[in-house]
Image (tube, rainbow, N blue to C red):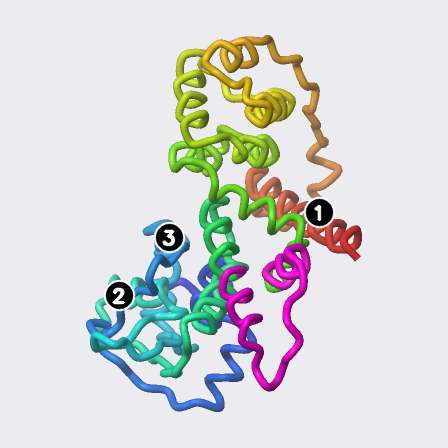
Amino acid sequence: MKSSAKNISLNSYDDIFSTEETREDAKREKVTDMPLSELHPFPDHPFQVRDDDAMKETVESIKEYGVLVPAIVRPRADGGYELISGHRRKHACELAGLPTMPVIVRNLDDDAATIIMVDSNIQRENILPSERAKAYKMKLDAIRRQAGRPSKENSRQVVGNLESAAIVGKESGESGRQVQRFIRLNELTPELQQMVDDKKIAMTPAVELSYLKPEEQTLLLDTIESEQATPSLSQAQRLKKFSAEGHLNEDSMLAIMSEEKKPEKNDLTIAGDKVRKYFPKSYTPQQMEQVILRLLEGWQKKRQRDQEW
């Protein structure tokens, strides 16, 4: 039996319904059923298309309901069309064995296309830090370029890096400062970015490490392997300080990284009977934990927005 709509994950709903703006656009614009072979990925698309459980659910949903909201595409100079939003939907259609999918064709310049591409994906669940970092950087660059040639609707140029970053994070509820932190991750080597994605290095120390020179980051990777330890925040801050002063070398890095870390007592246990009443009886402890963490993330973002303003 096919899965019902009530069992579809949030990721799947994103793929089917997209954003409110996209739904309204779909009502106004002509929808074309286009062969999948004519659809090409957005250049340097920062978001991975994964064959995970969410994709399986999306495939099942498309088999049952079809693609309810069209993808957005633009004509390519080399022929065919470039996907702006709908990369996951296209892949799901391929897995479902469909030859075509509904699209809306728009004539967009590179900057407008980049902004729509980022905004249509950035609220998705389970986005990796490296994906978010690249997406925010792409959108920030596009906004800055647009500010250099203001449109008739908005002739005021974007002022200041923090203001620009706040505009970038608006769709995802991120503060300007948090957007800037994510963008700093682009300065990490691919190996260190992967360690952040794998949660081997936390976000805050990763931002500090992004200020190290490329050759210092390569040396750090060797030190991490030899010491079998990743830097704490205080260690990352000192590595950054030594680098800025021109004193970071193999000996000083090893001295910092070989120091015994002070144990951090951050364990927190909540009795199950205190939270069980808030969840359906069918929820497992793992599912309850995931919901609690998502709610806390939303609370943290709200606090950051309040502090920003």
Residue type, mark 1 in image:
Gln
Q: How many numbered marks are there?
A: 3
Asked if residue 181 shows in the view, the reply is yes
How far apart, in angstroms, are the residues tagged by discs 1 and 3?
Answer: 26 Å
Q: What's the mark number on residue 48? A: 3
Q: Is residue 151 magenta?
A: yes
How far apart, in angstroms, are the residues tagged by discs 2 and 1?
Answer: 38 Å
Q: What's the mark number on residue 35? A: none
**In this image, 287 relative to 228: left or right?**
right
Question: Quick check: 75 above or below 209?
Answer: below
Q: Indicate which disc, 2 or 1, sits on the residue closer to the N terminus.
A: 2
The residue that mark 1 highlights is: 300
Residue in the image at 55% along x and 18% along y: 247
Please give the range of residues in magenta. Answer: 140-169
Disc 2 is placed on an element classified as helix
Crowdedness near tag 1: few (<14), some (14–19) or many (≥20) residues, C-alpha within 10 Å:
few
Question: Quick check: 70 above or below 286?
Answer: below
Residue 243 in percent (x, y) is at 55, 25
Farthest residue to the front: give it: 246
Crowdedness near tag 2: few (<14), some (14–19) or many (≥20) residues, C-alpha within 10 Å:
some
Given contact means CB atoms under 8 Å apart, are the residues at marks 2 and 3 in contact? no
Residue in the image at 39% along x and 78% along y: 70
